[in-house]
Image (cartoon, helix red, strand yellow):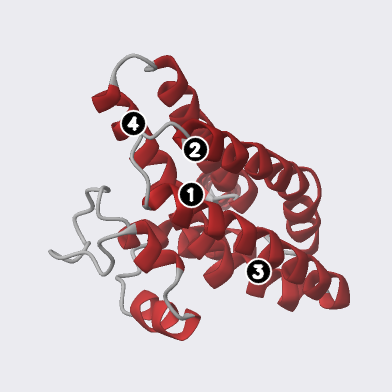
Amino acid sequence: MSDDLDRLSNTIKSVGSAFKMSTVKSILNLVKTDHAHVKQAYENYISSENNLEEQNRWANEFRWELARIIVAEELVVYPAFEKHLGDEGRRIAHEDRAEHHKIKELLKKLETKSVSDPDYRATFDTAKDFLMYHIAGEEENDYIKLENAITAEENDSIARSYERTKMFVPTRAHPSAPDKPPFETVVSLITAPIDKLRDLFSKFPDHK
């Protein structure tokens, strides 16, 4: 009887451990999914060439999602690089922030233009091309180094914090999001002082 109980207890522990591992989130996987979403918004913009309303919809989606990713990385991920990767992490974070600065400048230009402007497509293409360069470095190098340096629990914590930044974006329906989004334009989000962003972020609900 005792042996049977021991086997049952071990089985329950194994199942519980497997379930726990299956629900652990990966920051790399989350970021890859978000990057793919932004890429798809650009492709949808291109395929809607003769429909200004659809082009505007997908251009807005591109800008807001990209702005949110930028803020998420600067609030959550880059500090994790610096914490877990030491000097190399500080170098990576510094370089990525510099690349973000260029992307922010391009987003500002897009925000002041209409999709019907003759040079909108050229500016959009420039933003997309530089973004692809930036994304490649992150997905193939930066995030892999981070995940190799942290535990599954630390990865899960970083990933869940990253997900909470979706509440910054007004186009995202979220049951815990504020009735009035903290930022009404892409530019107001990407130019907000990091201390203000951090303070707002700290007040968002943290659902496990």
Quadrant (top left/top right/bottom left/bottom right) for the C terminus: bottom left
Residue sticking out furthest to the right: 87
Amino acid residing under circle 3: Tyr
The answer to which of 191 and 144 lies nearer the viewer is 191
Task: Look at discs 4 and 3 and give the one toward the viewer.
Answer: 4
- At x 41%, y 25%, the residue is 45
Q: CA distance from mark 4 to mark 3?
A: 36 Å
Q: Nearer the viewer, mark 1 or mark 3?
A: 1
Query: Relative to 108, is 28 above or below?
Result: above
Q: Residue at x 34, y 31 (%)?
A: 116
Earlier-in-chain disc, 4 versus 3: 3
The quarter of the picture where residue 105 lies is bottom right
| Residue contact at pointers 2 and 1, CB within 8 angstroms | yes
Q: Which mark is residue 78?
A: 3
Drawn side of residue 142 relative to residue 1, left or right: right
Q: Secondary structure at mark 3?
A: helix
**Could you give the CA–CA distance between mark 1 and mark 3, rounded to whole angstroms?**
16 Å
Q: Amino acid at mark 4?
A: Ser
- Say which label, 4 or 2, has the lower sequence index: 2
The first of marks 2 and 3 along the sequence is 2
In the picture of the structure, the residue carrying the numbered disc 2 is 38
Q: Secondary structure at mark 4?
A: loop
Q: Nearer the viewer, residue 208 or 117?
A: 117
> For numbered disc 1, what is the local secondary structure?
helix
Position in image of residue 153 (x %, y %): 61, 63
User: Which residue is the site of mark 1?
Assistant: 66
Q: Are marks 4 and 2 in contact (CB under 8 Å)?
A: no
Who's the residue at 59% across and 54% down the image?
Answer: 103
Compare marks 2 and 1 and give the one earlier in the sequence: 2
Front position among marks 2 and 3: 2
Q: Which residue is mark 4?
A: 116
Q: Earlier in the sequence, mark 4 or mark 1?
A: 1
